[in-house]
Amino acid sequence: MQFPFKSLLFFCSFSLCAQVSAEIANTDGIAAVVQCPVPTYEKLTNEQDIKHKELITIISKKTQIEKNKYAQFTGGVTLINQQQTVIANKLEINREEATFNAEGDIHFQNQNIDIFAEQLTASESSNATQLNKTSYQLAGSPGHGSAELIEVDADGTLILKDSTFTTCYGETPDWLFKASEIGISQDKKSVEAYNARFKLFGVPVLYIPYFSMPITNERQSGFLFPKISSSNKSGLEVSLPFYWNISENIDATITPRIMSKRGTQLQTEFRYLSGLQSGQFDLEYLHNDSEEKSNNDARYLARIQHTGTFSDNFRLYVDYTTISDDNYLVDIKSSQYNSNDAYLYQVGELAYFGEQWQATMKLQDFEVLGDHIQSYKTVPQIEAKSQFDLPIFNGIFDIYIMNKDGSDLQNITNSEWSETGPCWLIK
């Protein structure tokens, strides 16, 4: 039979559940590593079973209906709506109270997920849906888990209580995520977990009372995963990065880096993007190094990088780094340079691109670290080039202005003419 109950909340609720669950499994925070074949389930319905896509189709062995009031279906009940299907032993729909109840071996399926439950209740008047004693398997992914209760509120928030998630199989999965409550908000596009526990081979290794993470590609402010390491020079290191989404084109990452031997360092990364201008500013600052007994000066590294085009014809490039002392990279280390780097590269370049003329002014230097002897130095450089058509041949005229011997600025001009026809060159 066909039952035109279009506004049934059940299908809307499970569509949200399936979509969000698939997104969670595909985020960077959970690595879906396939260790054994992923379970698959046959399609519960065929295309020919969907006769009217705008209607809900219900198939059962026994049916009891009171027109416009009540309907009960028992024995191999199958409910079909477009690409979503649910089977159960018993199904009751009350039109007057706008309620929906299913019991016994419930199996919900769509293209994203298979969900199994013992009981399902839904109320259209309160816009709420509940499933009891559930388990789920993501389609085409090893991600699976269970929940004692799944509830969908009126605002579209999905709540899973006493839930688990893993990509491993067996009685004791290699890893397992468990939480007393997980809330998935459709408006905030984020996941909130309470009393979260992470287990390895059945042994609890991490407990977090509360955490939140996005389930979309949209950026959100919040703490990132901490980093823990150790070294002979700095001891135990713990970094707690905080990401600040200032605006759609500006963000910052502020990271307290706690070193047991040296103290607490503050690392700041600031990024911006505006039209054709983009850049990044990095600052690493340690106010007082506990390992330096004879020197209480602050130790720092600052680097600015900028690339931009303006006025349609000008391009600017800057990469400048300064450092507090020669041993900073060796003692404290940095993500900007390697500890064995002998110098810091500093460059600023302004370029002009016209229809016939191209010019570049470049300033570059090297800050030598340690006892290395400064063997060379690059002085300011200006380069200009023009290409134009002559009556007989094409001409290229280059001018270079540079410091040749390191003392006085000298003008050196190179003129090069070449023809596109017979091969000849004047220089």
Image: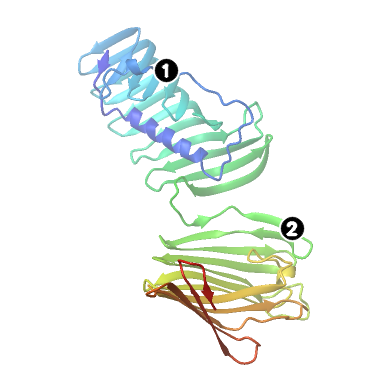
What colour scheme does the image use? rainbow
Q: Position of residue 245 (x, y in %)?
A: 45, 60
Q: Residues within 10 Å of mark 1 (few under 14, many from 20)?
A: some
Q: Is residue 14 left or right of residue 299?
A: left
Q: Is residue 117 left or right of residue 264?
A: left
Q: Quadrant of residue 394?
A: bottom left
Kindly identify the amino acid type of the residue bearing the numbered disc 2: Ser
Task: Read off the residue under disc 1.
Answer: 44
Q: Position of residue 16 (x, y in %)?
A: 39, 35
Where, quadrant-wise, is the N terminus in this rendering? top left
Q: Residues within 10 Å of mark 2 (few under 14, many from 20)?
A: few
Q: How far, Cα to Cα, is label 1 from label 2?
A: 54 Å
* Local SS, label 2: strand
Q: Which mark is residue 230?
A: 2
Kindly identify the amino acid type of the residue bearing the numbered disc 1: Leu
- The answer to whether residue 212 is visible is yes
Q: Are marks 1 and 2 in contact (CB under 8 Å)?
A: no
Residue at horizontal 48 percent and vertical 45 percent from the top:
192
Question: Vertical placement of 334 versus 77: above or below?
Answer: below
Q: Is residue 74 left or right of residue 138?
A: left
Q: Position of residue 52 (x, y in %)?
A: 26, 20
